[in-house]
Image (cartoon, helix red, strand yellow):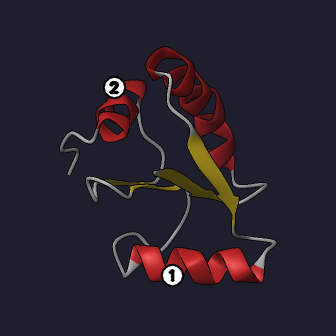
Amino acid sequence: MLYEYYGETCPHCIRMKPIVEEVEKELGVSVEKIEVWNNEENAKKLEEVDRGLCGGVPFFYNDESKEFICGGSDKETVVKWAKGEKVN
């Protein structure tokens, strides 16, 4: 599973939206988007997954490979992350 934890009005998250959509389309994958700024339950989920890795949004997590992206990134890195390749 691929997850993106984001804040609704986070400028970095907004900038990442078209990149994530492109990657989803090109790779035929789905990224589950979880809003954490306005949803306390989702914020708790982020804390459980983040475990001190990032501490902010956007936070991208690949549940299979355990690879993550902290903050905004370029398309090439998001593609690697979605494929489960090493990005950190």
Q: Residue at x 42, y 74 (%)?
A: 50
Horizontal side, residue 62 vs residue 37: left or right: left
Q: Please tell me the numbered disc located at residue 76.
A: 2
Label 2: state its secondary structure: helix
Q: Residue at x 39, y 35 (%)?
A: 78
Circle 1 residues within 10 Å: few <14, some 14–19, many ≥20: some
Horizontal side, residue 36 vs residue 67: left or right: right
Judging depth in this view, the residue of 52 and 10 nearest the camera is 52
Task: List x then y, in percent, for residue 74.
Answer: 41, 31
Horizontal side, residue 2 vs residue 62: left or right: right
Judging depth in this view, the residue of 80 and 72 nearest the camera is 80
Label 1: state its secondary structure: helix
User: Dots 2 and 1: beta carbons under 8 Å?
Assistant: no
In terms of image quadrants, where is residue 73? top left
Residue corresponding to mark 1: 47
Task: List x then y, in percent, for residue 9.
Answer: 78, 54
Task: List x then y, in percent, for residue 29.
Answer: 50, 31
